[in-house]
Amino acid sequence: MNRRLMDCKTQLINQLVYFDDEKAKFLKPYFDDKSKERADLDRLLTSYCKELEHIVSDFNETTIHSTVLIGSQVKLRYEDDGSCETYTVVFPNEAQPELNRISFLSPIGRKLLLSKVMQSHELDLPLGVTKINIEDIEYGG
């Protein structure tokens, strides 16, 4: 396994350890303890960790780019006009919307997390609902 791939695997293992140890502490500043939104995100992170475990156990060039993870670049195609945009899904403290670095906690980030290539989603944007397709996923770590 090449060095870049090994670094990616290490980053994913670090995410697993972080969420295993710190999930409740991580969620606290963002959500009330008993809110539905927190419960939804807790379920999303549980699913995310299960997917990470699967990817790490069968780690290769294909599996690392098969699912949108925290650290993935995602190429989206907007169905209404065919335009494309690339976003990187990141932790909240790394978000820079002006550079298309979006938090996985954001509405778009939550929709994208765990998505697969060719999966479609509807996004609620200020100008209305638009449909997107996932064109490509590349984990960059």
Image (tube, rainbow, N blue to C red):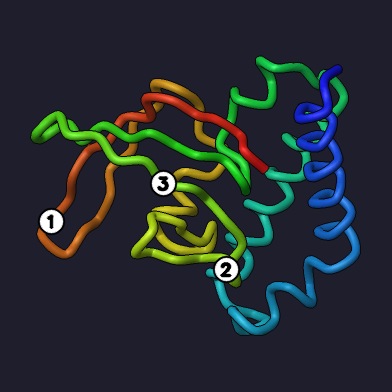
- Local secondary structure at mark 2: helix
> 64 or 129, which lies in front?
64
> 38 or 49, which lies in front?
49
Q: Which mark is residue 128?
A: 1
Position of the N terminus by quadrant: top right
Position of the C terminus by quadrant: top right
Reading the chain from its start, which is encountered first: label 1 or label 2?
2
Crowd band around label 1 with a 10 angstrom C-alpha radius: few (<14), some (14–19), many (20+): few
Q: Quadrant of residue 25?
A: bottom right
Asked if the residues shown at circle 3 and circle 2 are in contact, with their CB atoms under 8 angstroms apart, the answer is: no
Which amino acid, by three-letter code, is at mark 1?
Gly
Which amino acid, by three-letter code, is at mark 3?
Tyr
78 left or right of 44? left
The label nearer to you, 1 versus 3, is 3
Q: Which mark is residue 92?
A: 2
Give how far apart the Cα atoms at labels 3 and 2 are: 14 Å
Crowd band around label 2 with a 10 angstrom C-alpha radius: few (<14), some (14–19), many (20+): some
- Local secondary structure at mark 3: strand
Give how far apart the Cα atoms at labels 1 and 2 are: 25 Å
Above or below, comparing residue 68 to residue 97 in the picture = above
53 left or right of 86? right
Q: Which mark is residue 87?
A: 3
Q: Position of residue 4 (x, y in %)?
A: 76, 30
Which amino acid, by three-letter code, is at mark 2?
Pro
What residue is rendered at 46% in x and 43% in y? 112
Q: Position of residue 89 (x, y in %)?
A: 52, 50
Crowd band around label 3 with a 10 angstrom C-alpha radius: few (<14), some (14–19), many (20+): many
What residue is rendered at 62% in x and 41% in y? 69
Q: Position of residue 79 (x, y in %)?
A: 17, 31
Above or below, comparing residue 44 to residue 8 in the picture = below
Reading the chain from its start, which is encountered first: label 3 or label 2?
3
